[in-house]
Image (cartoon, rainbow, N blue to C red):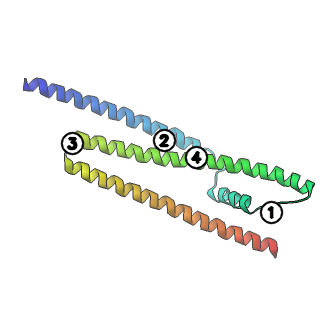
Amino acid sequence: MPQGATTVRHGIGQAAKALSRYRVANVARLVQVMGFQVFKNSHFNYISWLRCCFQKLLSPKSSSSSSSRSSSNSSSRSNSSCISSSILVVEVVVIVVVIVFAVVVAIVLVAALVGTLVVVVVVVVVVVVVVVVVVIIIVTIVVVVVVVVAVVFVLDIVVLVT
C-alpha cells in the first residue's frame, strides 16, 4: 500500500510539473509575440509621444479657415501617431503585467511543490520586493522622460519666441 501511495504522489507531481511547464511556455510565447509587436514598431519613441501630447494640450486655436484646415490635417496626423503610440504604451504595460504574473505563478508553483510555510512566506516577500522594484524603475523612467520632454518643449518655445 505505501508503494501505491508513492506512485500516486509521483504521478501527481509529474502532472503538476507538466502543467506548470505548459503554462509557463504559453506565457513565454505570449510575451515573445507581444514583445515582437511592440519592438517591431521602430518609430515608437516616448519623447515624441509625450511631445505630441504636450502639443495637443498647448496648441492654440486658429480662427482663419485655411490655417484651421492645415492645422486640422496636421493635428489628425499627430492624433493618429499619438493613438498608435498610446496603443504601444498599453502593450508595454500588458507585457510588464504578464511577466510579473508569470514570475508569481512560477514561484507559487515551486512553493506549492515544496509545501513549507517558510518557503511560501519567503516567496511572498520576494514577489512584493520584485513588484516594488519594477514599479520604482517604471516611475523613474517616466519621470525622467517627462522632465526631458518638458525641457525640450520649453526650449522649442523659447527658440520660436526669440
Which amino acid, mark 2?
A: Val
Image vertical order of residue 2 relative to residue 100, above or below: above
| Residue that appears at 74% across and 52% down | 78
* Mark earlier in primary sequence (3, 4): 4
- Left or right of 96? Residue 145 is right
* Mark earlier in primary sequence (1, 2): 2
Disc 2 crowd, CA 10 A, few/some/many (<14, 14-19, 20+): some
Image vertical order of residue 55 relative to residue 161, above or below: above
- Observer-side mark, 2 or 4, equals 2
Question: Contact, CB < 8 Å: mark 3 with mark 2?
Answer: no
* Mark earlier in primary sequence (4, 1): 4
Disc 2 designates what residue?
Answer: 31
* Mark earlier in primary sequence (3, 2): 2
Give the spatial CA distance, label 1 vs label 2. Answer: 41 Å
Q: What x and y, as percent, mark residue 110?
A: 27, 42
Which amino acid, mark 1?
A: Pro
Disc 4 crowd, CA 10 A, few/some/many (<14, 14-19, 20+): few
Disc 4 designates what residue?
Answer: 39
Disc 3 designates what residue?
Answer: 114
